[in-house]
């Protein structure tokens, strides 16, 4: 039952990690081409960036789990030593830290890197748009 609850929470949190996209200033070019064409151009630039920028989002997730698990082990061990149950404290702390690291890693992996953002922004500028940020 605990595993099912953990998985449900995990998938809800993973779904909340929405990918960001550029926000365009409403300059003359955007007004002339319209929102539909602008979205198509954003998708095209994003695809180019994905093909060009070599990123490994899975490594961020795994790294988050490892760091979280290690940190949780240390905290759990300290609590276990104080309460008199060192082994259980380490185990509980490692599990909690790994779960926290997993969620953090998924969130970080879902966010575009600065290089990716710069690539998309430049691509959009070359098409005549004026990107002003990401949301």
Image (cartoon, grey):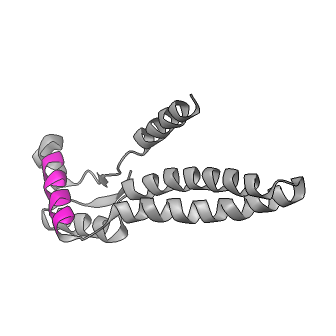
- Residue sitting at 35 percent across and 61 percent down? 57
Q: Main secondary structure of the magenta part?
A: helix
Q: Residue at x 51, y 59 (%)?
A: 65
Residue 91 percent location from the top left of the image: 67, 54
Counting from the top left corner in percent of width and height, residue 113 is at: 36, 66
The residue located at (14%, 43%) in the rendering is 34
Looking at the image, residue 91 lies above or below residue 116? above
Left or right relative to 89: residue 67: left
Residue 134 visible, this orientation: yes
Q: Which residues are magenta?
A: 39-51
User: Image quarter for residue 115?
Assistant: bottom left
- Kindly give the residue lying farthest to the top in the view shown: 1
Q: Nearer the viewer, residue 116 or 101?
A: 101
Q: Quadrant of residue 74?
A: bottom right
> In the rendered view of the protein, which quadrant contains the N terminus?
top right
* Left or right position of 89 against 27: right
For residue 31, say whether it is visible.
Answer: no
Left or right: 89 as drawn, with respect to 43: right
């Amino acid at each position: 039952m605990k595993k099912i609850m953990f998985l449900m929470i995990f998938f809800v949190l993973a779904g909340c990690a929405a990918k960001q996209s550029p926000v365009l200033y409403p300059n003359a070019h955007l007004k002339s081409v319209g929102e539909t064409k602008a979205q198509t151009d954003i998708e095209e630039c994003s695809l180019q960036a994905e093909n060009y920028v070599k990123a490994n989002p899975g490594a961020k997730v795994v790294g988050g789990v490892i760091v979280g698990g290690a940190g949780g082990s240390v905290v759990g061990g300290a609590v276990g030593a104080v309460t008199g149950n060192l082994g259980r404290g380490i185990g509980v702390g490692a599990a909690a830290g790994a779960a926290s690291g997993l969620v953090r890693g998924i969130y970080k992996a879902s966010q575009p890197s600065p290089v990716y953002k710069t690539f998309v922004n430049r691509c959009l500028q070359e098409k005549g748009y004026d990107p002003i940020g990401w949301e």
